[in-house]
Image (tube, rainbow, N blue to C red):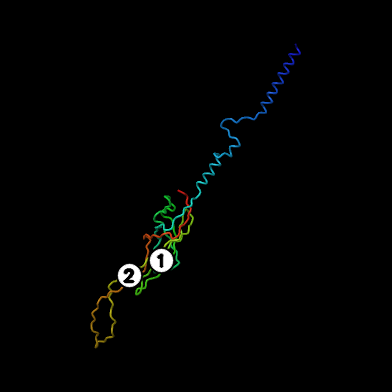
Amino acid sequence: MKFSTQKQVAVAITLALSGLTVGCAQRPEFAAGQSSFQDRSLPFHADGVAKKRSVNLAPLLAEVASGTPIQVRLESSLSSAHAMAGDSFQAVLDEPLIWKGQTIAPKGSLLRGKVLEAKPSEPSREAGYLRLALTSISIESKVWPLQTSSVFVKGATYEREATILPVQLASSSKNLVPAVTIQPQHIQVRDDAGISATRLLTFHLSQPVTVAHGGQ
């Protein structure tokens, strides 16, 4: 009986040690709220969200159609008396440029243009004239080339009265020149073409243009 009792105790100890070994070999479970390494590949991880946001902030491309009006005012005045073909000028957008309900270029955006033709007035023949076109627009610190229609401005031609003195003949105390009645005459005046900085000019896109904007 004593031997049988010892044997039972030995078997019980062996079984207890076997259970402890099996328990230690099992993989530990993660507590609620902890993240495993596999979480980093999931779409809702912070890295995935950051990448998605960066895509949303990328510039959007807008194709502005041909014929779209562009209203500007010059930054400084121009005159056919001084301007020359090839001269550049600067202007600011007087109305925002809209595309599909979004503002592509806000009011006040900077534009550049070129003098295509310039001719000073010839008082006896023709008034002076200017022909202008826009060449580029600045949107969010980037310059985009433009092709637009031209704006032609010609000086005024009108009539006014002028007093023309007759040619004086040589005279002496013995031979006096008879008095001549002076009649006012009408002459034509031909002015130079001038564009003030406050004057509104409207150009139209002659070719569609694709620009990038922030999507605001």
- Look at the numbered discs 2 and 1 and tell me whether their residues touch, using CB distance below 8 Å: no
- Name the residue that disc number 2 marks: 157
- Numbered circles on residues, count: 2
- Image quadrant holding the N terminus, namely top right
**Is label 1 in a helix, a strand or a loop?**
strand
Q: Amino acid at mark 1?
A: Arg
Image-based side of 136 in relation to 22, left or right: left
Picture coordinates of residue 158, whole percent (x, y): 31, 70
Please give the name of the residue rendered at 46% of the width and 54% of the height, measured from the top-left corner.
63
Residue 131 numbered tag: 1
Picture coordinates of residue 112, whole percent (x, y): 45, 60
Nearer the N terminus, badge 2 or badge 1?
1
Please give the name of the residue rendered at 40% of the width and 66% of the height, measured from the top-left corner.
131
Residue density around tag 1, few if under 14, some if 14–19, many if 20 or more, within 10 Å: some
Picture coordinates of residue 59, whole percent (x, y): 49, 50
Image-based side of 116 in relation to 177, left or right: right
Image-based side of 47 in relation to 8, left or right: left
Residue located farthest toward the top when viewing the structure as drawn: 1
The image shows residue 139, relative to residue 171, as above or below, that is above
Please give the name of the residue rendered at 44% of the width and 68% of the height, measured from the top-left corner.
85
Residue density around tag 2, few if under 14, some if 14–19, many if 20 or more, within 10 Å: some
Residue located farthest toward the right when viewing the structure as drawn: 3
Q: Amino acid at mark 2?
A: Thr
User: Residue 74 is drawn in which quadrant?
Assistant: bottom left
User: Residue 42 is drawn in which quadrant?
Assistant: top right
